[in-house]
Amino acid sequence: MVAQLLRLRLSQLLVGARQGARDRGQMLGLAAFVLASAVLLLLSLYAVPRGDIPSVGAWYVLIGGAVVLGALLGTVFLGLHAGLDPRAFSLIGIASWPLSLGLTVAGAATVPTLAVAILVFGMLGIWGGSAALVAVFAAVLSVLTVVLVARVGTSLSSLLRPDSPAIRSGLLTAAIVGVLAALGTVVLLRSFGRGVAPEEVLEAAGLVGWTPLAAAWAAPVAAADDDLAGAWLRILIAVVTLAGLAWLHERLLNRINHTPIRRIGARVDSVGVFESLPASGFGVVAGRSLINWVRDERYRVALLAVPVLPLLALPILALAGVPWSVLVLLPAPLMCLMIGWLPHNDVAHDYSAFWVHVATSISGRADRAGRLVPPLLLGVLVAVFGSLVAGVLSGNLLHVFTSIGLSLAALGAGLGLSSIVSVLWPYATVHPGEDPFHQPQFRGRAAVLAQAGTMAAAVALTAPTQVFFFQSILTEVWFWPLVTLGVGALTACIAIWAGIELGGRHFEQRRTEVFSAVLRG
Amino acid sequence: MTAFDTAAETALAESELSDGDQAIRAEEVSADDLATDLVAGESETPAEAQAAQDAAAAAVEAKAAARPGRKPAAKRPARSRKGRAARSTTVRETVVEVHGLTKRFGDVTAVDNIDLIVPVGSFFGLVGPNGAGKTTTMSMLTGLLRPDEGHVIVHEHDVWEDADAAKREMGILPDRLRLFDRLTGRQLLHYNGVLRGLDRSRIRERSNELIAALGLGEAADRIVADYSAGMTKKISLACALLHAPRLLVLDEPFEAVDPVSTVQLIGILKQYVAGGGTVILSSHTMDLVQRECDRVAVIVEGKVLASGTMDEVRAGKTLEQRFVELAGSVDAAEGMSWLHSFSD
């Protein structure tokens, strides 16, 4: 059984390679990228001055915790998995223990597992001879834990959400691994430039090292620090964790094999979210948009782009020497800018289902406004909570208002422009129900214009708010943050109102033409 | 009882019903024709015509009343009675007039100067080979595609000048256009109902009846993306019927629908027509059109080659024979002599 499943997994890997030069190149490229990220991270750990075991160890433990947590969250919530959906085997009638073992071994044959193995075994050189036995043992446990956690996550995802197809994308995995590894590398290199790791990192690592998440990763650190008893204790925790995971995995498979798919349907005679929304054009479009943002993979994948902008921009700005007090205020506005930009091609996402809006003469304003409800809700949440965190971190609570102000301006400008652009220049996108990562080959000028133009114009519209934003940070006078908030909120209101008006008017005058443009793609 | 049993039983009931309906409709049509003749001054027995007309109307009403589960007919006795009363005194009114409709895509003229007249209460079939322009015509008729020339009048409203009013009169089932398929069937009905201006309780009431009538049952609370092709057609038809339009425009309503469901759908459509509604449907199943429709237009290469009552167009032949005649059959097998000598 184990051998058969492993063979199945290997042929899955080979299928990608057989699909033609373009796909093969892409696949090998992604694999190389993921592995290179791991090597980069490993090298930056090696860049520490020898002998500072506590610092290296602390970072290593935190990385381990992040990897295990990432494997769990990635599989449960994003549905990233190795292509072995446990439900696929439920009709064959394999006992759950052999199946569990087989899926675990087969699931180990993935590029991310290899990347983890490179990192973990690569570190053996640092821990030193006295810790060798513990280190090897811990390394094996570390890799096994990651593999099993990923399998448990996959099973959980399959059990909890049989409806939503898993996202099987090397591209996404590579992007996540790459961004995390790049971040880790940048942080590590900067930190080592200054010598020992900060006190908070050491403390956090000490704590995480005792949890099931990173006990296996902490064991060699303890051993290298001549704390053999502590090392074996952590090994024990890791072994118990592994046993627990194996048991859980078997139980989950058993459960999956014996539960038919039950769809989480609405109550009988219920229209779900529409029940609590007004029975108007605006209400139903808003309800349908909310459902799309939750149920449609295309929207879920688009949401992944939201944190990317700050993740990319912040390390670069940090390296460029932008002070901490400014840096912490940027993530919330940047994320709001992305959220406001997301619906700029919303009509094309409906594709031909948009005919209902053409055939029923729904008002343009209702159509425009309804579609903005989900991003508006999300954006306001990010603006408020992101800014609260930013204010606390910046050490000046007044900057909560500074950050909210710019966030609202960015969100409103983005949403207002999106309202106009999505009826003015709809461009080809992934059709409903298709793989969200397979973008159409040719999108033409409209796509570039719509994407880049919306983003640039949104940034431009926040210019007045930006002036007060920097005024607040530079002068530290108490009223500037409040002015920023006021200007930002006003910008948002005007932009959204104008977007709905102008977009709505265009929609009503040209709805047939908009529909034809969407169909042409 | 299994779902299959239920479906089969419904179908059985429907097929009995549709036989009855057909008889009634035939009666009604003859009464109508008689009434038309009357106005033209060719008949000499007005009282007789009126009596026949009334009898037909009464029979239809009785039928509708006897089927409380069937919304379209049962819900509109007032209008249909009015429509019929009007018809008995004037020439049968038209619900759709198409004049000089033309659509070009680049060099290709998809629809070429089409004229169509669809009288109220007709079951109108639009037939033509693949790519003849049926879907293009229907898209322009329903306001989904702007014609290059010509205009369409639906119940006295120009589809392009007075779009909102015209669109209110129509229920549409387009071919190969998607639905908002992340919604459940019931949610989709709510969505369409609200956009058609119905209130919450009326939508719920009508949805329940439509779901029962179309045999969607427990599927109503599943998302439409998971429906089979036939179920998708059914939920689309339910959406089209929901606001009780005067005119139904159905593009290939029976494609990919199983025979049982087809019988069921036809039953519902006939009842709708009996209640004063008008149906325009396109199909390339000639048998079905000949059997069910009372009027037909043949479109080939964007032109209407024949149009009128079924009997006029058929001219004593089957619709299929007539259609092949009009479409100009090329003996496709001719010349492919290799097809007769099988390779070893």
Image: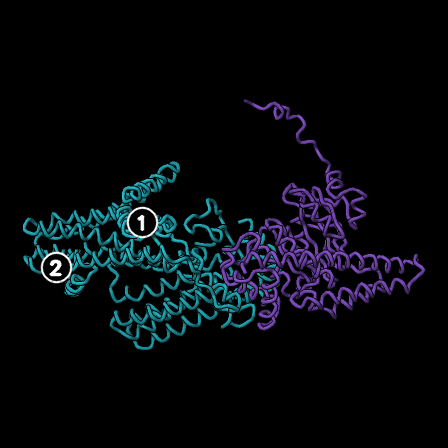
Which quadrant is home to the N terminus of chain A? top left
Point out the tag, 1 or 2, that comes first from the N-terminus: 1
User: Would residue B104 be found to the left or right of residue B44 on screen?
Assistant: left
> Residue A291's spot in the image, x, y percent?
46, 63
Give the class, few, some or many, for how many residues have Cα within 10 Å of label 2's Cα (few <14, many ≥20): some
| Residue A205 position by quadrant | bottom left
- Residue sitting at 75 percent across and 38 percent down? B325
Q: Which of B295 and A29 is in front in this view?
A: B295
Query: Which chain corresponds to the colour cyan?
Result: A
- Report, in whole angstroms, how far the alpha carbon at label 1 lies from the one at label 2: 30 Å
Report which residue position mark 1 lands on: A174
Residue A144, visible in the rendered structure? yes
User: Would residue A478 be found to the left or right of residue A442 on screen?
Assistant: left
* The label number, if any, that marks residue A196 in the structure image: 2
Do the residues bearing badges 1 and 2 touch, measured as CB atoms within 8 Å?
no
User: Would residue A188 be found to the left or right of residue B313 on screen?
Assistant: left
Mark 1 secondary-structure assignment: helix
Same-subunit check for callouts 1 and 2:
yes
> Residue A242's spot in the image, x, y percent?
21, 56
Query: Which chain corresponds to the colour purple?
Result: B
